[in-house]
Image: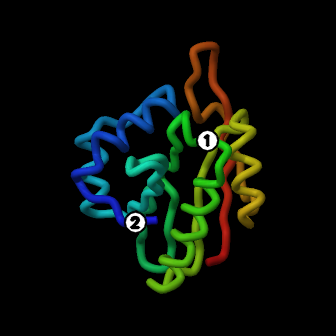
Amino acid sequence: MRALSATDARDMAAIHAESFDRSWEAIEMATHTQRDLCLGADQNESLSAFIIVSTAADQAEILTIATATTARRQGFGRKLIDHAVKTLRERGVAELFLEVAEDNIGALALYRDTGFQPIGRRPGYYRREDGRVAAITFSKKV
């Protein structure tokens, strides 16, 4: 695990584009590396997965987490979450939040396995080609 910087922005954007229908551009990623907690995991000397966490006072929110297609199902998501939680705890954060599309079965399993509890549902939150899907909100004590 390592802290990410603006030099990682293009790789972050490429991984995000593999993972989401509405991906973020490199300029957005570079901005996040300047203001948020951005952690990455490398494999074979290249970025394989990353997480972006925004912090405000004693609360934080996972804004996004993504793994390159070639690196999925290898535990990078869990390692990133665990490392982010440790870092946030050291910074005095008490609670971590996130939201995920209710049809993202893999992410739902990851979040439950890492101790997140569902706390709400936002109907029709995410746009899909064939309609809308709800977001499930989660929280975890850090």
Q: Is residue 48 above or below residue 111?
A: above
- Residue 139 point in image, percent of width and height: 66, 64
User: Residue extending furthest front?
Assistant: 44
Closer to the camera, 79 or 122? 79
Residue 132 figure quarter: top right
| 55 horizontally vs 117: left or right | left
Q: Residue at x 27, y 39 (%)?
A: 26
Residue 88, x across and y down, in percent: 49, 77
Residue 23, compared with residue 36, is above or below; it is above
Reading the image, the residue beneath label 2 is 2
The residue sitting at 60% across, 54% down in the picture is 77
Q: Are marks 1 and 2 in contact (CB under 8 Å)?
A: no
Residue type pointed to by label 1: Arg
Residue situated furthest top in the rendering = 130
Which residue is depicted at the point 33% across and 59% down? Answer: 4
Secondary structure at numbered mark 1 = loop
Q: Nearer the viewer, residue 112 or 49?
A: 49
Q: CA distance from mark 1 to mark 2?
A: 18 Å
Which quadrant is home to the C terminus? bottom right
Say which residue label 1 marks: 72
As drawn, the label of residue 121 is none
Q: Is residue 130 above or below residue 17?
A: above
First of labels 1, 2 by sequence position: 2
Q: Which kind of residue does numbered mark 2 sit on?
A: Arg
Relative image position of residue 56 (x, y in whole percent):
41, 72
